[in-house]
Image (spheres, rainbow, N blue to C red):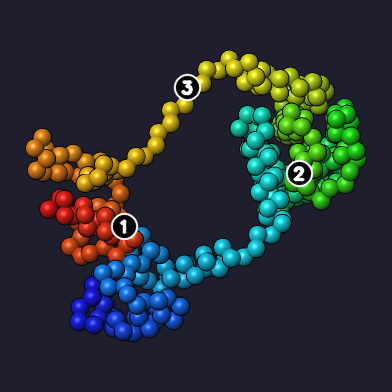
Amino acid sequence: MEGNEGEVEGRGGERFNEPCLRVILSGSGMDLSGLEGDIITWAASPDGVFSVRSAYRLLLCEEISTLPRSSLTAQTGRLWKSIWGLPLPPLVRNFLWRACRGALPTKIALWKQNVLTNPICDQCRSGVEDEMHALWSCSELASVWSRESWLGPISSQNFLDFKDMTSTVLSSNTKCESALSGYLVWMIWHVRNKKRLQQSGGTLEGINQRAHDRLAEFNVPRASGATPTAPITHIAWSPPPPGCLKVNYDGRSSPRQTKWSWRGDSEIVVKAVKSPNSSLTTYGHIVADVQCLAA
Ligand SMILES: [Zn+2]
């Protein structure tokens, strides 16, 4: 917007009455006195142009940010953090996360999508197969989980769903034990899939030992430091000396520094720099400096 004889002009040619604009802004409790020399910007859109849509989004974001975060959301956030922090390969961590979100192609999920005609577990034929059943509560898995004595009373506890069970296991046990449970559910799922496809290896026999071995294999190189790590280089921004301008942008100057050329892939910045109109963004003063240097 540009001030001109008591009016403010939008970049699209719309004209607003400045006194009217000041009334609107002062209604928000803003003190507009003593603003001579300052400029009005609109930070709710990338190009600084006001739109009803951008205003709506701004108000919506403000409202959401003031809502109290429910304890359930906070609890879920802690669970995701715990899962991503487990000493497991990313593939297994991702599987555990998907299982907690109920995103596995279980029989109940496929039945709901009309892919299967019944949601009953193929192993025990006595329960609906969801994540909780397929990975934990199916009677066929009793021998697997009963061998993990570190689970203690958790093995006979009732849970709401797989996410609830995982949350309890992760919060009640060490990282190593929690990771072992992650390996076990991942391997149980693979055995289940092989059984369904009648492929070899579809047996739960020896699965506990295999899970222990896989966990040990994954963590040995990490513990011994066999994988060399690159030295950490700390890079920090430093301000330019007084009287100098630092531009963090791809650019070059001629040897005599009388000409500048700029190169970049930010469409918004390039458009703002090339535009004959003044930028109404919060970085409009930087765009003005760039235009001045490039002139
Ligand atoms: Zn079953």
Q: Residue at horizontal 47%, vertical 71%?
A: 56
Q: Which quadrant of the view contains residue 271?
A: bottom left
- The earlier-in-sequence mark between 3 and 1 is 3
Q: Is mark 1 within 8 Å of ligand 1?
A: no
Task: Name which residue type carries label 2.
Answer: Ser
- The earlier-in-sequence mark between 2 and 1 is 2
- How dense is the environment of label 2, judged by Cα within 10 Å: few (below 14), some, or many (20 and up)? some
Taking 27 as reference, is 206 left or right? right
Q: Is mark 2 within 8 Å of ligand 1?
A: no
Q: Nearer the viewer, residue 160 or 252?
A: 252
Taking 126 as reference, is 271 left or right? left
Residue that label 1 marks: 283
Task: Name which residue type carries label 1.
Answer: Tyr
Numbered badge on residue 250: none
What kind of element bears circle 2?
helix
Numbered badge on residue 167: 2
What count of labels does the image hold?
A: 3
> Alpha-carbon distance for marks 3 and 2?
34 Å
Task: Name which residue type carries label 3.
Answer: Ala
Q: Position of residue 126 (x, y in %)?
A: 88, 44
Q: Position of residue 182 (x, y in %)?
A: 73, 33
Residue that label 3 marks: 230
What kind of element bears circle 1?
loop
